[in-house]
């Protein structure tokens, strides 16, 4: 067990602080230290192979001041990990200190022992992480092992920033493919060259230098063979001192027509070249291309005989490629957009026009396909020299869904009235899985976790906030200390849907009219407003207090359901009676059917 002093506030900052800094600054100082760790992690992006580019700082209290005693990022090649680099720097000063890590420390044995063990052995007292590691070999076990060893664990600080920095690793682990950044340089009138096949200098030196920085931060750079034939590019990072950070150079070449004298093949022994092709392994050129040092990656083909980009990305993910920078021409850009493979767009726009005859950036697809698409949002606008840079990122589908299968019964610990209402709820969930910003259904109402902690009795606890509007439509206005609530975490990709899809947006309240035994079950009768009653049908689904139930009968504004013994035992239903109220969410399908019925002729 870590040798920790009595728990107290840790007023952290990025410079020594005066001893009177209070615990009110805890969250802000945690974020500032975490931001320092994030900056360190960015230094190694594109250099860590299949491993994530993580940053770590270790902060110790000395004579009432917070001091940085260790710092590090994932080493080139992926090892040693950031935590070990920082611990080596800190030495004995790590005992009793706080470690800030941009990703949950690993807990499994690979080529090196787990970082959780190193942190515990070093005597680190507290670990603050930005986010959980979705790798199935970790996935919460790192946080849990630290906690079991007596280390205080806090997670969720600067999670959005960490998610962007680690987007490549997260994409490969979760989706099986790299994070794809599409880079385009175009004129003010949306052209990328004076005419097809003609190299055209569009942006200025500052923008071109920025592109080389982007190359240094990518694992691989992607172009099509037509770009190789037209431009004969080197695709290396040519900034002073950064040549060694040139990424893997990828070429899509369905028929292996890449010229033998292409710069890429001439330098394949110095900087890796991978040719993505759907040609047969017995193709006549395969041996010659391999002899140059190039790697041939055989991919699936589309119906028109082109390289299947989805399959190619999956194969790259299988080879440990986290982040791909696509620099191909208009046709590559168009293909990636049409296949919905673009995760991020970096659009450099020069001030001048090219005019009639110029090649459009997306080969006929308007630039607004991305810039005005609801799938993307603008993240950054800046001038780079005389050119404009606009960065757009994919908006992940953040629609939260539940199944109406209650997984825990929570207990309200406190309710505080303010501008909004703040409630703390005790639960049996592992607090490591309750990251800040996570969604959880509380008696059928989707709420956002704003903080979490471990209770002395071993239970976890999380805090949620909700507005006056939520109070007006739900039973949350009746919450007080001791109130029991049904809990369900939101669905994750791959989770089984056991009940019916529930959004967690309560439509109103139903009043329990009676509860009668029916065999081993309980028959509940309810009354709802007429506006909701029209959506409730016999044998249809309804979510009551977050529980997916089947409607038995309907009579005007009244309806009934059966609660089986198991449901009564694992939810709050065993404690409800006539006169109590529950939250109601009508079936989504019923909404759409009613909406369509309005337009019937």
Image (spheres, rainbow, N blue to C red):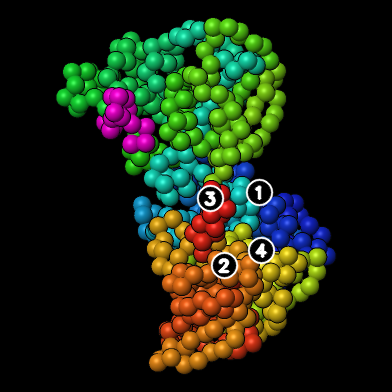
Compute the Cα span from label 1 to label 4: 19 Å
Q: Do we see residue 287 in this rendering?
A: no
Residue 599: image x %, image y %? 56, 49
Residue 403: image x %, image y %? 47, 66
In front: 127, or 140?
Answer: 140
Element type at mark 3? loop
**Could you tell me which residue is drawn at 53 percent across and 16 percent down?**
360
Identify residue for label 4.
Answer: 450
Compute the Cα span from label 3 to label 1: 56 Å
Which numbered marker is on residue 534?
A: 2
Query: Which comes before the other along the chain, label 2 or label 4?
Result: 4
Identify residue for label 1.
Answer: 35
Compute the Cα span from label 2 to label 1: 52 Å
**Could you tell me which residue is drawn at 37 percent across and 18 percent down?**
225
Which numbered marker is on residue 75?
A: none
Please report contact status of discs 1 and 4: CB closer than 8 Å, yes or no: no
Which image quadrant is residue 368 in?
top right
Residue 284 on the magenta segment: no
Q: Residues within 10 Å of mark 2 (few under 14, many from 20)?
A: some
Element type at mark 4? strand
Query: Which comes before the other along the chain, label 4 or label 3?
Result: 4
Q: Which residues are magenta?
A: 293-311
């Amino acid at each position: 067990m870590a040798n920790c002093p009595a728990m107290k506030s840790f007023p952290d900052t990025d410079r020594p602080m005066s001893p009177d800094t209070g615990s009110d600054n805890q969250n802000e100082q945690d974020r500032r230290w975490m931001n320092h760790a994030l900056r360190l992690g960015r230094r190694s992006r594109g250099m860590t192979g299949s491993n994530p580019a993580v940053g770590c700082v270790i902060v110790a209290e000395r004579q009432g001041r917070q001091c940085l005693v260790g710092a590090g990022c994932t080493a080139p090649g992926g090892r040693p990990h950031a935590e070990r680099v920082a611990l080596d720097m800190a030495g004995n000063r790590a005992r009793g200190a706080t470690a800030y890590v941009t990703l949950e420390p690993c807990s499994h044995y690979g080529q090196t022992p787990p970082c959780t063990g190193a942190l515990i052995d070093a005597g680190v007292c507290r670990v603050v992480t930005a986010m959980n590691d979705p790798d199935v070999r970790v996935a919460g076990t790192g946080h849990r092992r630290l906690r079991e060893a007596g280390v205080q664990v806090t997670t969720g600080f600067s999670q959005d920033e960490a998610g962007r920095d680690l987007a490549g690793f997260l994409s490969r682990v979760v989706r099986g493919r790299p994070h794809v950044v599409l880079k385009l340089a175009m004129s003010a009138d949306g052209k990328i060259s004076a005419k097809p096949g003609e190299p055209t200098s569009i942006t200025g030196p500052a923008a071109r230098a920025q592109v080389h920085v982007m190359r240094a931060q990518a694992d691989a750079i992607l172009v099509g063979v037509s770009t190789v034939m037209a431009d004969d590019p080197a695709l290396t990072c040519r900034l002073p001192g950064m040549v060694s950070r040139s990424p893997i150079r990828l070429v899509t070449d369905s028929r292996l027509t890449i010229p033998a004298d292409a710069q890429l093949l001439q330098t394949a022994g110095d900087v890796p070249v991978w040719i993505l092709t759907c040609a047969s392994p017995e193709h006549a050129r395969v041996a010659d291309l391999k002899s140059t040092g190039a790697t041939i990656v055989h991919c699936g083909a589309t119906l028109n005989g082109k390289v299947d980009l989805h399959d190619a990305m999956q194969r790259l993910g299988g080879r440990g490629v986290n982040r791909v920078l696509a620099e191909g021409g208009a046709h590559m850009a168009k293909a990636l957009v049409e296949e919905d493979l673009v995760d991020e767009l970096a659009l450099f726009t020069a001030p001048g026009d090219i005019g009639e005859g110029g090649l459009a950036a997306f080969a006929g697809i308007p630039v607004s396909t991305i810039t005005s698409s609801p799938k993307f949002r603008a993240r950054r606008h800046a001038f780079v020299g005389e050119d404009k840079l606009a960065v757009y990122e994919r908006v992940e589908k953040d629609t939260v869904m539940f199944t109406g299968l209650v997984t825990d019964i929570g207990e309200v610990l406190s309710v505080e009235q303010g501008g909004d209402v703040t409630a703390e709820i005790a639960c049996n969930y592992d607090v490591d899985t309750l990251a800040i910003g996570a969604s959880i259904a509380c008696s059928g109402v989707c709420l956002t976790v704003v903080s979490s902690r471990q209770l002395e009795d071993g239970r976890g606890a999380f805090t949620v906030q909700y507005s006056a509007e939520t109070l007006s439509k739900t039973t949350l206005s009746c919450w007080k200390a001791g109130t029991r609530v049904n809990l369900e975490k939101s669905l994750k990709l791959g989770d089984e849907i056991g009940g019916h899809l529930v959004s967690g947006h309560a439509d109103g309240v139903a009043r329990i009219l009676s509860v009668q035994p029916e065999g081993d079950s309980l028959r509940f009768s309810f009354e709802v407003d007429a506006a909701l009653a029209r959506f409730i049908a016999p044998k249809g689904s309804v979510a009551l207090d977050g529980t997916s139930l089947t409607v038995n009968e309907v009579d005007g504004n009244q309806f009934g359901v059966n609660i089986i013994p198991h449901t009564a035992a694992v939810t709050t239903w065993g404690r409800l009676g006539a006169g109590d109220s529950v939250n109601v969410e009508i079936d989504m399908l019923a909404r759409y059917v009613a909406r369509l019925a309005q337009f019937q002729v």
